[in-house]
Image: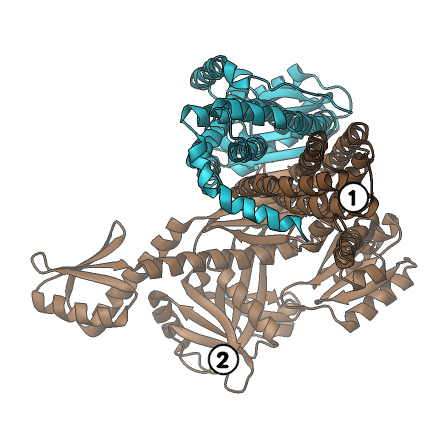
Chain colours: A brown, B cyan
Amino acid sequence: MLNRSPLWKTLLVVIIVAFGALYALPNLYGEDPAVQLSGLRGVEADAATLDNVKSQLSEQNIDFANITLEDGQLLVRFSDPDNQLKARDLLDNTMGEQFSVALNLTPATPDWLAAVGGVPMKLGLDLSGGVSFTMEVNMNEAVVKAQEGMLSDFRSDLRGEKIRYRSVKKVDDAIEIVFRNAEDLDQAESFLKKRYRDYLFTDNTDTLTLTSKMSELKLKEIREYALQQNITIIRNRVNELGVAEPLVQRQGQKNIVIELPGVQDTAKAKEILNATATIEFRMVDNENDLATALNGRVPASSQLLYERDGTPVLLKKRIMLTGDHIVDAGSSFDEYSRPQVNITLDSPGGSKFSNATKNAIGQPMATVFIEYKPTDRKDSEGNTIFDKHEEVISVATIQARLGKSFRITGAGSQAEAHSLALLLRAGALIAPIQIVEERTVGPSLGAENVKAGFQAIMGGFALVFIFMLIYYRAFGVVANLALMANLILIVGVMSMIPGATLTLPGMAGIVLTVGMAVDANVLIFERIREELREGKSVQQAIHQGYDAAYSTILDANITTLIAAIILFSIGVGPIKGFAVTLSIGIVTSMFTAVVGTRSIVNAIWGGKRLDKLPI
Amino acid sequence: MQILNLKETVNFMAYRKYALAFSIILMLASVGSLFVNKLNFGLDFTGGTLIEVAFESPAELTQIRQVLESDGYGDAVVQFYGSSREVIIRLAQREGVKAEMLSNEVLSLLKEGTGQELEMRRIEFVGASVGDELTEQGGLAMLTALICILVYVAFRFEWRFALGSVFALFHDVLLTLGLFSFLQLEFDLTVMAAILAVIGYSLNDTIVVSDRIRENFRKIRVGGPSEIIDISLTETLSRTVITSITTLLVLAALFYQGGALIHGFATALLFGVFIGTYSSIYVASAVALGLGISKEDLIPEVIEKEGADQQEMMP
């Protein structure tokens, strides 16, 4: 019979909407104040940390709702913000050295919902408040530095091979080597070609010049490395900021996006992001007594520094090597599966180091990490005073004369080796970075934006609701049901997609979707009215109305979807949010307006002998 | 209920010459305004710094200007934003100061200079290079959108419809840009998003109309192209009007309740939807007609389509 939906179709609609409702549900629960502890530099929170925090909190009579341990992070929930603040101060005092202690708001999703993966929508910074930076990596600098490195490598290689040359210099983006005779040129070319496969060499026998350029692949590699290095360094620094759920992400070929929810003091954040760090290798002073030094009598040629855990180390002041000679550092395992850190130096660094270590075999060498951290103090000109923080990050015994590449073993766990490698690389930033964009939204504006967006959605919804009811009567109710289902599905889908973020323009997208989603129903209903006017039977009119309108709806929506997808592909930050809600809205509205209303219409009016329709 | 109960076919195409003249005049005016007034590009495109602060009591703009001027920020643009307690300050890029630190310096200056407690509500800083890139990307996005849509519509309909609808889109975008240029409204990223949404909406409308024209070309055997277009436009008119009404209703809600940040967005869409409705009636169809769309262009598919229809009737 005409206009009867098979049971499975109706069930499918019900199940999909119910599913959407289930995942939209977490948004109705509020948020609990919480304190989040995440380990710094390779430290991870574990069961012992959990017990420690528990006992500290109960000692101070600070009530908490629960503590959970997840991915090496500890999350303590509270029922009121007072306790949250007290706990933050307490934990920051006692554990701040090893953990970044941050205030956080965690969704108060009930356990049964969380168990099926229900999470509320993620709010963008324009709604939650916070700061977002875009930092640009200076790629030219990275390439220039790499070229300078090659310049000195070429020189020392040629010298090492005893090939005589007149000059080696940088010309634009190439390196030119001028020789005295054609023989030397040939010899050098075949030698260098073999050694540097990622370089392109061209010779000119008239001027006795060998020109070398980096291959595209090599250039790409350098840029990629510069970007990755900066990302790891920034991650490290952001962790120190004590922000809950920070985001550090690459954007395109040379940009890094940093989002710090809840951060207000943007000046401090900027200074920390812009902070500089260096590495120094220095010998441990074994000739003088550590105990006397600890009593205040530090020899003039030495300096007393500390490791992260507070162990004092007496170091010689003379610097063997600085971190700007480090080309690469990575962690791996040695032949006994112990974690190790592999370090590669540039050529001058290699020979310097080789000289410095040849008479020091068997003696301990320390790696010192120096960071300039901004303080609250300012000098007379209003510039922030930076404190020099020196910290010994590793002490290792020199096993052999070290050269261009060497390794540090016994650095502890894999995580520690990894973080040591990161720090070593941090000491030698290949390419400087610069903030090119900042968007900060204060918490009050964020809250206002949420309110305004919510009101606009509700207001728009109510207006359309009333209009449809008056204009299409009973069918208007059906369209309104579809509209509600649509809203639920949008929220449900937004909550389900991990990367989707709700922004203010995103809310505008939802408003727009509400207005445009009824279009499909208007198309169908107008068609049904037309068919009725032409004298078709009620059942024929319903059937024809849906059928004829279908391809129109599809075409119209696909083209809008094209616009939305293009918007997404160029979109930055908040605009992306608009494109996302608009795209989701288009897809869900097609489902609710066509399939959804059809099920309802069929269930109520389908297959019955009717003379009129309440349309 | 019915708003439009049209028994007679409206002679839309009879007025198409006037509509065309109207559109051309508006388009020329828009181009003129874009040349003379240019677009008032927002921070997203020009680069610079914007600071929004809220004072405890109504702020005095002259005092704020003085404070800024005495410290060498004489070029700062200071305006109320939303209420007399909220003020935005715009600053161009300058030499000597690290661009990204500018906002923080101005904030602390204001705190000292006015002696009032103030709350930072919003800081936006965009480097010059970012703005340039964005302008390029934005223009590219609009072009890509238009080309993709041209291809889709040409594939689904006919090239005359495709050209007609893309011309209509171009018309809508140009007039919206013209409005923003004429009124010197700020053109920022959200407005650009709104214009792309206008493209989507206007296209939606155009396609509904084109779809009906195609259907009627196949169905109705008498009458020339102009009559058939008139019939189709009349048939779809009430849908066109109702959808415009619902969309304008939600946009009105957005305009009045969405807050100051979303004003430009809502304005662009309100105007764009209005113009989009007009253009789908007049511009798209008139262009297709002008390009000589005729029954023969759409007839060959008829037999196949009718057969398909009949089978579906039976299940």
Q: Which residue is mark 1?
A: A601
Whether residue A449 sits left or right of residue A582 in the image: it is right
The residue located at (90%, 57%) in the rendering is: A62
Whether residue B8 sits left or right of residue A472 in the image: it is left
Q: Position of residue A541 (x, y in %)?
A: 71, 38
Distance of label 2 from label 1 (alpha carbons): 86 Å
Identity of the amino acid at label 1? Answer: Val
Q: Which residue is mark 2?
A: A363
The answer to whether marks 2 and 1 sit on the same chain is: yes
Label 1 chain ID: A
Q: Give the SS element for disc 1.
A: helix
Q: Is residue A506 visible?
A: yes
Q: Quadrant of residue A454?
A: top right
Label 2 chain ID: A
Given residues A119 and A15, the one toward you in this image is: A15
Identity of the amino acid at label 2? Answer: Gln
Given residues A350 and B57, the one toward you in this image is: B57
Does residue A171 sit above or below A190 in this rendering?
above
Q: Position of residue A109 (x, y in %)?
A: 82, 55
Q: Earlier in the sequence, mark 2 or mark 1?
A: 2
Q: Is residue A385 visible?
A: no
Q: Quadrant of residue A64?
A: bottom right
Q: Position of residue A354 (x, y in %)?
A: 37, 74
